Image (cartoon, rainbow, N blue to C red):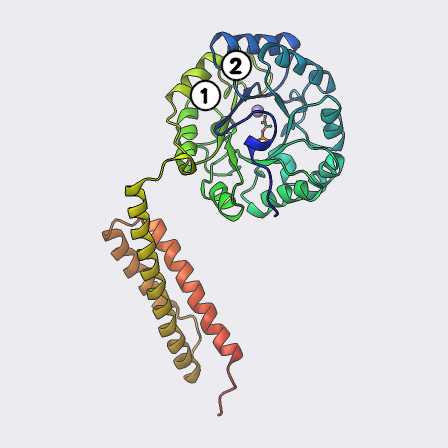
Amino acid sequence: MKPHKQIKDWGLGLSSPLIIAGPCSAETPEQIEQICKEMKEENTVPQLFRAGIWKPRTRPGSFEGVGEEGLKWMEIVRHHLNIPITVEVGNAAHAELALKHKVDVLWIGARTTVNPFAVQEIAEALRGSDVPVMVKNPMNPDLDLWMGALERMHAVGIDKLAAIHRGFSDAYDKRFRNKPNWSMPIHLKRVWQGMEVINDPSHIVGRRDGLLEVAQRAMNFGLDGLMIETHHDPDKAWSDAKQQVTPKALKQMIQSIDFKEPLENMKPDERLQDLRRAVDHLDDQLLDILQERFAVIDQIGTHKREHHLTVFQSNRWKEVMESRTQKGVAKQLSEKFMKELLYCIHEESVKRQEKQLREAEPLKK
Ligand code: PEP
Ligand code: MN
């Protein structure tokens, strides 16, 4: 994807770490007004105010949002807090209405990101506009689907983009409402340099306790902001009552978080530079060793070919896996890491040897 504009260049006066807060759903004008007043009183005005106007509910019969009417109430936020607002859009009609009411930033929800038809429809409705769009990860841990939604926006000329990590639904792990998968947002940032990812601990945890821990982890990993559902009377909220916090609790939480400095903002740091040089050197050594290892693997491949042996030998694999994992664990490397590393190396070895078999001249009988 071609370069996109970072949050600081959206023209809305926003910066990283971006703090987004506001209710899961806009319920009444009085509710919006009360939340704004308490945010002001508590001196915890976010940079961007969120509110769900159309609510994608998993099952019918629950509160599905106030609809277009709620967009008019966003004026209350502008009046009291003088900050930009963001709402979720789930189809082209929502997108058109949000543009009509001059919503500052749009977001695409997890249930929409999974559907390329809906994402494309929204993208078409936004063509020619300059509105920033934040794309939540899809319900399932599929990085391509997440990237695809961002690409569809970019393809129609939306270049003010960010992503939101809100966790993934998991049939078995009930510790979270949506289980975080930290490697995925980090991978997104690796493949698209400069792509900012906001963390949404509210939908990850699904309860008030535990929000701080997830938010802190997100900052430790270097994510670029937080979206926290905030309501003046959370227990009476019409949606996601268990996970919303009061403006007062929001303030306490933000104060407790240790926001890390992005390295780009730091002065040159001698010690860090030294350590990084050491890592560079070790990585070079690691690559040399891998190169040597694969050269031996190729020789084994030739031998197997000459003796009509299959590439994959399960006993040998089992032995390699067990002995190396044990050695790794003894060196304080985690078992999970060792297994993943060995799978990765072994898969590459098997593929190389099988390629050798395919490409080799047939052996003379
Ligand atoms: C929300 O932000 O209220 C919401 C519906 O989130 P998600 O799309 O992450 O479920
Ligand atoms: Mn919600």
Q: At label 2, which amino acid type do we have?
A: Pro
- The image quadrant of residue 261 is top left
**Is residue 96 placed above or below 294 in the rendered structure?**
above
Q: Position of residue 42 (x, y in %)?
A: 47, 9
For the point 34% across and 60% down, which residue is it?
284
Q: Which residue is depicted at the point 75% across and 36% down? A: 128
Q: Earlier in the sequence, mark 1 or mark 2?
A: 1
Label 1–label 2 contact, CB within 8 A: yes
Q: Disc 2 designates what residue?
A: 234
Local packing at callout 1 (Cα closer than 10 Å; few below 14, some 14-19, many 20+) is some
Question: Closest to the observer: 285 or 125?
Answer: 285
Callout 2: helix, strand or loop? helix
Q: Residue at x 32, y 40 (%)?
A: 269
In this view, the residue farthest toward the front is 268
Q: Residue at label 1?
A: 208
Looking at this view, is 98 or 136 the one in front? 98
